[in-house]
Image (cartoon, helix red, strand yellow):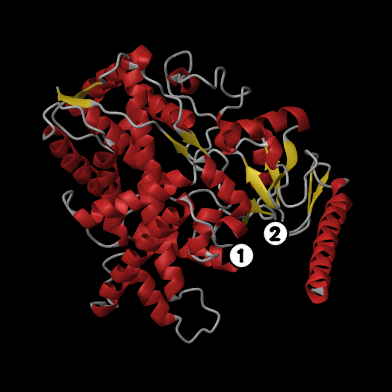
Amino acid sequence: MLASGMLLVALLTCLSVMVLMSVWRQRKLWGKLPPGPTPLPFIGNYLQLNTEQMYNSLKKLSERYGSVFTVHLGPRRVVVLWGYDAVKEALMDQAEEFSGRGEQATFDWLFKGYGVAFSEGERAKQLRRFSITTLRDFGVGKRGIEERIQEEAGFLVETLRGTCGAFVDPTYFLSRAVSNVISSIAFGDRFAYEDKEFLSLLRMMLGSFQFTATATGQLYDMFYSVMKHLPGPQQQAFKELHGLEDFITKKVEQNQRTLDPSSPRDFIDSFLIRMQKEKKNPNTEFCMKNLVLTTLNLFFAGTETVSTTLRYGFLLFMKHPDVWAKVQEEIDLVIGKNRQPKFEDRAKMPYTEAVIHEIQRFTDMIPMGVARRVTKDTKFRDFFIPKGTEVFPVLGSVLRDTKFFSNPQDFNPQHFLDEKGQFKKNDAFVPFSIGKRYCFGEGLARMELFVFFTTILQNFCLKSPQSPEDIDVSPKHVGFATIPRTYTMSFLPR
């Protein structure tokens, strides 16, 4: 009895010391870090945040503390950058200092610092350089990949014709087409639309992506050290990510058995060849774990972001039928009805280009940006940010900066048009981020969005079961990602 009592006292003493040390460390930095609400031990600023409306919670804090402030997401200390000026100063003017990778707890459960997207330092630099070069080798940025996108757009059109104008949920129609483009690079081939394994993979990607946008996903991002051991929807997200990893691992094993080093067929082959060349280098980053997880990075990002943007875009079109009708007029004038759209057509289609930019701005796919981390002790404006501190460059705050967009809460293609109706670039258009760690899939994504949108509108008129005024275009979830509401629509042949 005495021993158990002494043990309890010892545990309480240890906990008290830990809490006091945590508070002391915070106080030591408070005078140097950007301002922010006072955190409580372990839960941080949880009481000041709404996990269902994380973006809006941060917006309220920015109105009180300014464009650079500190917030504690549970035990995580994060410096938040709000608006164009703060994000640009950090990611462009002090690019090296802000080039580290912060946490995204759901994905970190699997990636653990491996793969091109969630690594940092020399590993990130080497994998990024290799990935960009290899994507170019397989046609990204060239005519080769455009032909692949056009071919896939053709398959999509035929599949949509097969719906015979019935109301359908467009989610997997669009994701199958988009995913097949990156699959042809990563795996050397496309999937048949009826392939059950393919549909299962798409469901796993969508499920884990959507989880990061939910209130539970945001809660997990704060308290993952505890929640990863508890039951809940996070366990389903882990299961989905693990299923995707297993699929990539099997693809790698297939390629290993049939590899010809003189003739790489896809991204996996190219990585395997590089692994062979560096097998005597004890410090090489070209290992099996980085191969599997970099391929998964490409497959996942190359599917979900573009297909979700397309899905949100068609919802916006049905809310604003005058917009898609005007895009169709421009398609008929510049391209006609008998040849496929080409990416170069956009130079003569300012309205369509403005509409696609506005869709990306309004949908704000990764609103908080992918978290960064300062690589060394950093002076930023009048503040001191210690090495290792996480940073949220809030891309949504740039895409809604009133200094650059007159009515940022409204969907309005005029944001990207001048008085003469010509396309107008805007420095605050940053859906792919900026600086050293911008999304290197930007060129591919832009080509896909243009070709898929214009090919579908060239061939179909759109119809919703609701009248435009009844369509809700506010997002279903906003967290790490922005997820549109589920809906049905009809593709009526023109």
Quadrant position of residue 210: top left
In the rendered structure, the answer to whether residue 176 lies left or right of residue 123 reads left
In the rendered structure, the answer to whether residue 394 lies left or right of residue 203 reads right
Verify CB contact (< 8 Å) between mark 2 and mark 1: yes
As displayed, is residue 87 above or below residue 273? above
**Residue 320 locus on image (x, y percent):** 35, 17
Neighbourhood count class around disc 2 (C-alpha, 10 Å): few under 14, some 14–19, many 20 upward: some
- Cα separation, mark 2 vs mark 1, equals 8 Å
Quarter holding the N terminus is: bottom right
**Residue 78 locus on image (x, y percent):** 70, 48
Q: Secondary structure at mark 1?
A: helix
Residue at left offset 28%, top offset 20%: 330
Residue at left offset 54%, top offset 61%: 229
Q: Residue furthest front?
A: 1
- For the image, the number of numbered tags is 2
Q: Pick whichever, 428 or 393, lies toward us.
A: 393
- Report the disc number at residue 375: 2
Q: Pick whichever, 171 or 182, lies toward us.
A: 171
- Report the disc number at residue 121: 1
Q: Is residue 367 visible?
A: yes
Q: Secondary structure at mark 2?
A: loop
